[in-house]
Every structure is written in C-alpha cells, then in structure tokens.
Image (tube, rainbow, N blue to C red):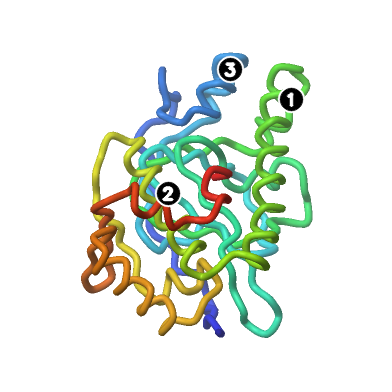
C-alpha cells in the first residue's frame, strides 16, 4: 500500500489565543511541567489545530513542542518507497515533537492532526533549558520511556496481530482520547486513513468495518466513524490496546 506524500505539507492557520499560559492547561504532562517550573508559562501559547494539518514532517526542524488538549495528533513514519504506518497517537496525556528540544537533526516522524481541537505550544529551547531541574528531567524522561515502550509494542503488534485486532485498538485509541475531553464526537476518519494507520489494505479495512458495524460495535458514514459499543471493540482489540 502506497500513501502519496504531498510536495508541500498543508498547514492550517495556528491561532494564538493567549500568550501568558494557562492556570490549568488541560494537558496532563504540561500541567506537571508548569507545576515544577511556573516560569515556562511565558513560553507557552494556545493554538487551534485543524483536521489534517501537519505540525511537521520527517526531518523537519521545529521551534515548538505541541501539547494537545482537545485535539488528537497522530505520528507516522514513511519509507523511501512511499509506505506509511502510524506509530503513535497523542492526546491530552502527552506531547508531540519533543525531538525539537534535544535533536538538531529534526523530527524522526511526521505529525498530523487526526481530530481538530486545541493544543498548547511550548518553545523547545525553553524546555531544554528547564531540563536542568531534576523534577522536569524526571517527568520528561518518564514520558519518553513510556513513548519508547509503545513504539516497541507497535513493532510486535504489526508483526503478530491481526488486521482486525489492530484496527479495533486504533479506533479505541482515538475514541478514548476524545472521551477524556468530555466530548463524544464522531471520529472524522476515512477508510484510507485507517488503512494507513494500521498497515492494512483499504479493501481489508472496509470489510472489517462492515463486520464491526453488523455486530453493533461501530457505525460509519462517508469519512466518519462512531463507536456504538466500546466493549465489543475491546473484546476484539489486541492486548496492545492497554499500552496506549
């Protein structure tokens, strides 16, 4: 399966809502960092993220690290022959683009907005400087260790788990992050996007979605999907689902 890569990443308008930083951001990781280093507030700005917007592409250098609140961001990795696979999904529990603070060579992945919403950008150089605080370093280190564990799990999942199990786990990953925001929105995802995310062919994904709909686990229309019975999806998902 080949996913065409645009020559220029489509970028939505990042709307700066305020500059001084929030009292409570809505992102668990950012709240922890701000509690240790309140001075980071001056380096934070709130932004609006549109669906399909690219935060950065593989190898791109960014000055910002993104902390989603109501938005959900996916990271993918592409091969030289155009193959693409989802490697991470991040909501209000974490951050995207942390390489900006530590790696001058740029990002290792491509990050794209799966679910529109809000997020906070933190200046990468400010976080790098704040790492002198052991509390900040330990918090970031814990997140990175967990992120590495999930990436390793992705390798095992893609090699040994069925397409149906991977699909159910991926849908639940998005669903759970939306539910955590207090909303119960429809997932604006297409069969093609799901196929790229789980590493399966589109006809396979369409057949699996039809089965899941017949079983009452989901419902879907054109470029949208809703979870109608999360328990049925959990029963069909691979054990990696608990890793997200």
Vertical placement of residue 40 versus 161, above or below: above
Cα–Cα gap, marks 1 and 3: 15 Å
Q: Residue at the location (43% across, 69% down)? A: 194
Instruction: Measuring from the top left, give residue 156's x and y in whole percent.
Output: 69, 59
Question: Tag 3's secondary structure?
Answer: helix
Q: Residues within 10 Å of mark 1 (few under 14, many from 20)?
A: some
Q: Which residue is mark 1?
A: 137
Question: Tag 1's secondary structure?
Answer: helix
Q: Residue at the location (71% across, 80% down)? A: 80
Nearer the observer, disc 3 or disc 2?
2
Q: Earlier in the sequence, mark 1 or mark 3?
A: 3
Instruction: Measuring from the top left, give residue 100's x and y in whole percent.
Output: 68, 46
* Left/right of residue 132 with respect to residue 41 in the rendered view: right
Q: Which residue is mark 3?
A: 39
Q: Earlier in the sequence, mark 3 or mark 2?
A: 3
The answer to which quarter of the image holds residue 16 is: top left
Q: Residue at the location (59% across, 73% down)? A: 84
* Left/right of residue 88 with respect to residue 50 in the rendered view: right
Q: Which residue is mark 2?
A: 72
Q: Residues within 10 Å of mark 2 (few under 14, many from 20)?
A: many
Is 155 in front, or is 19?
Answer: 155
Figure label count? 3
Q: Residues within 10 Å of mark 3 (few under 14, many from 20)?
A: some
Instruction: Measuring from the top left, give residue 211's x and y in whole percent.
Output: 31, 72
Vertical placement of residue 40 versus 199, above or below: above
Cα–Cα gap, marks 3 and 2: 26 Å
């Amino acid at each position: 399966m080949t996913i065409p890569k645009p020559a220029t990443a489509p970028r939505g308008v990042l709307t700066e809502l305020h500059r001084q930083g929030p009292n409570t951001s809505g992102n668990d990781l950012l709240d922890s960092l701000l509690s240790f280093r309140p001075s980071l507030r001056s380096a934070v700005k709130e932004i609006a993220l549109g669906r399909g917007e690219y935060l950065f592409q593989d190898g791109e250098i960014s000055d910002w690290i993104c902390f989603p609140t109501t938005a959900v961001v996916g990271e993918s990795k592409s091969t030289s022959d155009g193959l693409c696979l989802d490697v991470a999904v991040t909501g209000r529990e974490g951050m995207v683009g942390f390489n900006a603070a530590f790696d001058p060579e740029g990002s290792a992945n491509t990050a794209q907005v799966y679910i529109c919403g809000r997020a906070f950008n933190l200046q990468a150089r400010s976080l790098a400087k704040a790492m002198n605080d052991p509390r900040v370093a330990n918090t970031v280190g814990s997140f990175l260790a967990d992120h590495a564990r999930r990436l390793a799990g992705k390798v095992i999942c893609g090699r040994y788990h069925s397409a149906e199990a991977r699909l159910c786990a991926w849908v639940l990953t998005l669903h759970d992050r939306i539910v955590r925001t207090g909303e119960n929105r429809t997932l604006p995802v297409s069969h093609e996007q799901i196929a790229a995310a789980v590493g399966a062919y589109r006809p396979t994904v369409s057949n699996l979605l039809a089965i899941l709909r017949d079983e009452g686990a989901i419902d879907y229309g054109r470029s949208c999907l809703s979870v109608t019975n999360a328990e049925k999806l959990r029963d069909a998902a691979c054990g990696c689902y608990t890793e997200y």
